[in-house]
Image: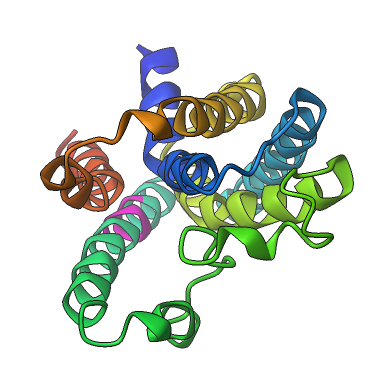
Amino acid sequence: MQMLYVILLGFAVSFDALLAGVAYGVRKITVPFSSLLVVGAVTAVCTAVAMIAAQGTGMLIAPQSAVMIGAFLLLLIGLWSVFQEYLIKRLTPRRSDDLPQLRIKLGKLIVNILADPEAVDIDHSRSISPSEAIFLGLALGLDNMVATFAAELLGVLPLYTPLVMAVIQMGLIWSGITFASRLLPESVKERFPYLPGTLLIIMSVLRIVK
C-alpha cells in the first residue's frame, strides 16, 4: 500500500515531465539515456532534500499538527495546479506569446519547458546534453519538492521514494518523446493539465479524513 502511495505521488508531481517529453518529441529534440540519468539523479536529490527538510520540521511540531499541515499544503498545491492550468487555458488563445511570462508571474517554481522546450537546449543542437539535462532536472525536480515536503509531513515516506521519483520522471519524459508522434486527439490533450492537481486534491482529502 505504501508503494502504491509513493507511485501515485510520483505521477501526480511528475506529470510535467510527460508534457515536456511530448513537447520535445513534437519538436524532434532528443534526450539521450545519459541525459535521462542526469534528470533522474537531480530529481532524486531534490526529493531527498524535501524529505529531510520535512522530517526536521516534523520534529518541531506535534505529529497531528504536522499531518494537518501536510494535508493542507497538498490540498493547496492541487487546487493551485488546477486553477493555474484553467487560467492559462483561458488566456492562451488570446495571447499565446504571454504563456511563459504568465506562469512566472503567477509564481510557478520552474521554467515553463512545455511552452518553450528549446530553452533547455542551450547550444541549439536539437539534443539535450547531460550538462543541459541538469537544468531540465532542476526545472522538474524543484516543481515537486513542495509536494514531496507536504507528503512527508503526512507520514514518513519510505527510503526508496527518491529512487521511485527518479524512475517515474525518466519514464514519463521517455514516454512523452516516444508517443508524441502518434498525435493524440486534441480533446484528450486538453484534459491532461487537470490530472496532477486532481490527484493531489484526492490524496490530501483521503489523508484528512483518515
Q: What's the colour scheme?
A: rainbow
Region rendered in magenta: 71-75
Q: Main secondary structure of the magenta part?
A: helix
Residue 104 in view in this figure? yes
In what quadrant of the picture does the C terminus appear? Answer: top left
Instruction: Please tell me which residue lies in front, 187 or 171.
Output: 187
Residue 1 in percent (x, y) is at: 35, 11
The quarter of the picture where residue 48 lies is top right
Q: Nearer the viewer, residue 136 or 187?
A: 187
70 drawn magenta: no
Is residue 60 in view from this perspective?
no
Residue 167, quarter of the rendered image = top right
The x and y percentages for residue 209 are: 14, 39
**Rendered residue at 47%/80% (across/down):** 107
The image quadrant of residue 4 is top left
> Which residue: 26% across, 65% down?
85
